[in-house]
Image: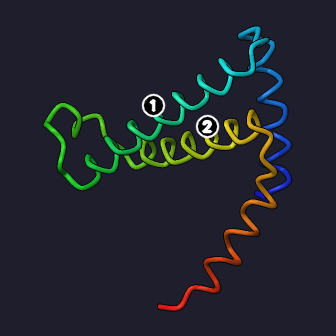
Amino acid sequence: MEMNELLNFIKAEDERLRKYYGYTDEEKRVLSRTVKVAEEFGELCNEVLAASSLQRKQKLENHSREKLEEEFADVLFSTLLLASAMKIDINEAMQKKMEKMKARKY
């Protein structure tokens, strides 16, 4: 998948969610998306623990590689939707961050 395809999907999903939830208050929209990122990250953490056999038995029984992959995707989608709500140009932000990372001296 290309980044532009992903960002076009996020734009369409953002509009779909706006209509579905009737978002009119931007602060509430940003807050709800922030909480959603935290929720999805928590679910990812649970799957990572399960993949490492560090969860209780019931959670280990429900774990699968597919669920782990889905949680990674959920975190990325939720993060991109939050960036969109905050009017962040994610291409530009990623480019700047990559340049900083390349310049690091270890």
- In this rendering, the answer to whether 69 lies above or below 13 is below
Which secondary structure lies at badge 2? helix
- In this rendering, the answer to whether 100 lies above or below 105 is above
Name the residue nearer the viewer: 46 or 36. Answer: 36
Q: What's the distance in space between the residues labelled 1 and 2, CA to CA?
A: 9 Å
Look at the image and tell me in which quarter the N terminus lies: bottom right
Name the residue nearer the viewer: 85 or 63. Answer: 85
Identify the residue shown where x is 67% and y is 36%: 82
Circle nearer the N terminus (1, 2) = 1
Occupied quadrant, residue 99: bottom right
Q: Position of residue 37 (x, y in %)?
A: 53, 36
Mark 1 surroundings: few (<14), some (14-19) or many (≥20) residues within 10 A: some
Q: Which residue is mark 1?
A: 39
Q: Which residue is mark 2?
A: 78
Identify the residue shown where x is 84% and y is 50%: 5
Q: Which residue is at the far bottom? A: 105
Tell me if 25 is positioned left or right of 59 in this view.
right
| Three-letter residue code for mark 1 | Glu
Q: Position of residue 45 (x, y in %)?
A: 35, 45
Tell me if 11 is positioned left or right of 67 in this view.
right
Name the residue nearer the viewer: 30 or 47. Answer: 30
Q: Which residue is at the far front? A: 27
Mark 2 surroundings: few (<14), some (14-19) or many (≥20) residues within 10 A: many
- In this rendering, the answer to whether 43 lies above or below 94 is above
| Three-letter residue code for mark 2 | Ser
Q: Position of residue 64 (x, y in %)?
A: 36, 44
Identify the residue shown where x is 65% and y is 17%: 28
Q: Position of residue 29 (x, y in %)?
A: 68, 21
